[in-house]
Image (cartoon, rainbow, N blue to C red):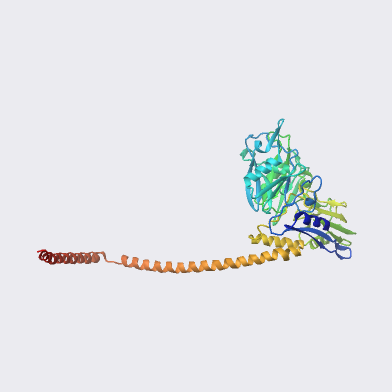
Amino acid sequence: LQDLADRLNSAAGDWLQVIVQGDEEESSGINYEAPTQKLIFRTLDGSALNIYDLNPTVSASAAKFGLQTALVMDDTNTVFPLDGLDPNMPALVNVEVGGKGYAVKLYRDQVGSLSGSTWNVDALKVAKAIQSQVGEDLIGYRELEDGRVALYSKTGQSLRVADLPFGDPHFADYTSGIAANLGIHSGVAGGEIAAGSAPSSDGVIRIASGGHTVDISVLQTDTAEDIAKKIKGLAGSWLDVSLYDADLSGSSGSQRISLAAKDGSPLAVYDVQGDVANSFLRIDTALRSASNVSGWTGSGSLSITVNGYTHTIDTKGMNINDLVNTVNARFQSGDVRAELVEDDTGDARFVMWSPKGYVIEAQGDIPGLSSPASSDVRGGVGPYNQVMTERTSADIGSTDLFGLLDDLMQAVRQGDVEGISNTILPKLDEAIDDILCVRTQTGALQKRYQTSNSRLKQMNLNYNELYSKVSDTDLAEAVTKFAMAQAVYQASLATIARIIQPTLVDFLQ
């Protein structure tokens, strides 16, 4: 890694800093955490950073290290859905950059090319359409050397893509599946299901993301459409549910369900009862024991690897509850969670899942599973079991205090001491100075407001006093006084006229 960091620093010049940070081994007998090393990238001017593999077929180092900030589109066997649809109706895709969503319309003639009777989707054309509708200042793309296309956020903010339902009410339960089939649909992508098929037994699926958790009861007679509707009905407020059908005009095509959290959080999907998520939808992301573990007793050691580091646990003499508590205590960073669930037969099943969307690998004394075991990958690359992009957002940290605090939180979790000391803390000091400046400006504005408010109150009092005097006037008395004053005024004018007239005549003579 140090050699790689040196080569990266040499190639980048004076705008990028790449360092290697290591954690020493921590051990207590058989229980230990293996030593690790990590690459840390930092732009010296605080600008956004994007990292992706130029030729993923030859080398996928960025994806392997979990550094990839781009969504990589592969248009192999991706077709534009036509059967049963108006050829002029666009496919809809939601592209979200930094929390702001854009509904992108993809027309057949715009993103496809006709081959025989099939319209094949061109990933490069899709990238151009997304950039033109979202904005060149937000979205960038690059055609990779192996023919795939990288789509990324120029601002370093989180990038999320999800298929949206068709605009035709008749097909409102379905999506085009373009994002899912290109491999850029955020979240978890399920496997292909034969249209009209149903699971082999009843079951309960659990979906968790951030602070949300929902259990979906599935019947043996439920089709993919039925399951998708149930998920939308119970979790549609925080989940994007995509149902793709390759043959909307009939029942011969394959179907696929894809799930993504609306806020971009990773998803955990696993079976509480039955095996619908694992065997039928092929959408589960957890390690789940295949047999009853209620009477399990540890007899060796269990090694759990996630995101490049490994914890080894001495399981001798443990029961299953002890193991659950130990796993949760060892992974206090939240990379791995363990729990017991009860099957419909009353059997206890041991489940390990990652709240951060990581692939979990286990080896050794695994309850109810053969060693080694690994959670399934549902669309992700590198350490992730689902489609995710790394967020850098370095260019908005100087103005977005909450984004800066998020960067600080990530740096603390990753142990990036140099990044905290040299980059984040100085930015926090600048943010505090900005807050003090804003408070000063706000105080001056508040003083002006208070002065204006006092003046308006005084004017209002004067107007009320004048209004009161007018309202209290005796109209008859006022008219009489006015008539008397008018008579006096007219008499005065007449008298003055009589005095002035002879005087002027005498003067003229």
In front of the other: 86 or 174 = 86
Residue 315, image x, y percentages = 87, 61
Residue 76, image x, y percentages = 75, 39
Quarter residue 192 falls in: top right
Residue 212, image x, y percentages = 69, 55
- Residue 315 shown left or right of residue 243 in the figure: right
- Residue 467 shown left or right of residue 112 in the figure: left
Give the quadrant of the C terminus: bottom left
Give the quadrant of the N terminus: bottom right
Which residue extends farthest front?
A: 509
Quarter residue 200 falls in: top right
- Residue 232 shown left or right of residue 460 in the figure: right
In front of the other: 448 or 6 = 6
Is 28 located above or below residue 273 in the figure? below
Which residue extends farthest right?
A: 299
Q: Measuring 67% from the left and 43% from the top, which residue is drawn there?
A: 128
